Amino acid sequence: MKNKSPDFLALLESFFCEHLPVSVGASPNTIKSYKFAFRLFLKYMLEIKKTPADKISFKELTYDCLSGFLNWLETERNCSASTKNQRMSALLSFSEYTQNRNFEAASVFRTNAVRVPLKKCAHKLRISFTRQEVQLLLEAPDETTRTGRRDKVLLSMMYATGARAQEICDLRVRDIVFNESGTASITLTGKGGKARKIGIPAACAKMLKQYISFRNIDSYLQRHVFSSQIHEYMTVSCVEEIFKKYVSACKEKHPDKFLEASYPPHSMRHTTACHMLEAGVPIIVIKNFLGHVSISTTQIYAEVSQNMADKHLKEWSKKWFSTDKVPEQSVNSKSDLPDFLMV
């Protein structure tokens, strides 16, 4: 007698508990986003299709069912096109996984999933700071306070490295090597656990070294470089609050600058890419510096407006220092929601 092939729910559990975190090495943010997408999908199946999670079969996942889910996201939950596409990406990833595990049952699901068209999104202009705005932002923290000193170094590091907020949060003392030349080599761990080593200018390296000594963590290699006021480990939300605090202060003090509605931490990464590109740094070097898999991603980050392109910046590395959240909503409060989908 043949062993029974794993069903939808069993495969969904192994997808989240084994495939994504172990086999793929997906980031916690990716897993969190995918879980939220499937909590919404199970809510849709229960409320609209009247099918609880433990009764879902692959034969029910038709083209009409999947496209209906996307329409439900738009009409009932007011999701944008980009959000709908993110939710569909989770279903596509799962469909590919299931096809390899249970081809006979899941191949139809995979076929239907790839047929569902992703909705075109309006192109969003990526936000970046001008060089003057960067300078004002770096001057904003009050270095006479412990928190202000931390924030000054953190903002400077994000500009000097082009690091993601999560990469800055994960940075430990062991990841930094100070060179005899006065510069420093930093190892950043990015998406999917991929590490890259980059260099930072001497001015920023000096500031970083002094800050680590100030905290007396030079010999504690496992310690995180940046900590919150109550925890040893800083979260992305804490970095977001730091950005919000100083951008708001700069907006109030300089109303003719910082004209965008908001500047998330990622805008500093985009700024680094833009300024490096304008300084003549080759695109392939910027790609490796930022840790992008594809050079097309770098080209998107490094979009430069015509006005900015007309400006000729001098050597970036010497002049710069001169002076997914996935909203957590209440879904599937009913008992049919599997435990492995809870964050």
Image: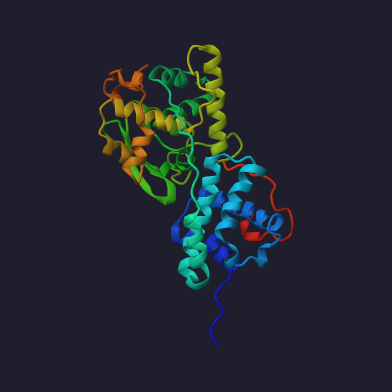
The colour mode here is rainbow
Rendering coords of residue 268 (x, y %):
44, 29
Q: Residue at x 40, y 20 (%)?
A: 130
339 relative to 264 in the view: left or right: right
The image shows residue 35 at horizontal and vertical percentages of 58, 53
Residue 7 drawn above or below residue 157:
below
Q: Please say if 129 is above or below 60.
A: above
Tell me if residue 118 comes above or below residue 269 in the rendering.
below
**Side of 104 relative to 174 (left or right):** right
Which residue does the image show at 37% across and 30% down from the upper left? 272
Say which residue appears at 47% left-offset and 25% top-offset. Answer: 152
Q: Quadrant of the N terminus?
A: bottom right
**Which residue is at 64% across, 43% downward?**
75
Q: Is residue 182 left or right of residue 336?
A: left
- The foreground one among 11 and 204 is 11
Q: Nearer the viewer, residue 213 or 24?
A: 24
Where is residue 171 shown, x and y percent of the image? 45, 41
Residue found at the far bottom of this picture: 1
Which of 182 and 292 lies nearest the eye of the viewer?
A: 292
Q: Position of residue 133 (x, y in %)?
A: 44, 19
**In the figure, 229 relative to 308: above or below?**
below
Q: Is residue 7 visible?
A: yes
Q: Residue 116 versus residue 123: which sits nearer the camera? A: 116
Quadrant in which residue 48 is drawn: bottom right
The answer to whether residue 343 shows anywhere in this view is no
| Number of numbered discs | 0
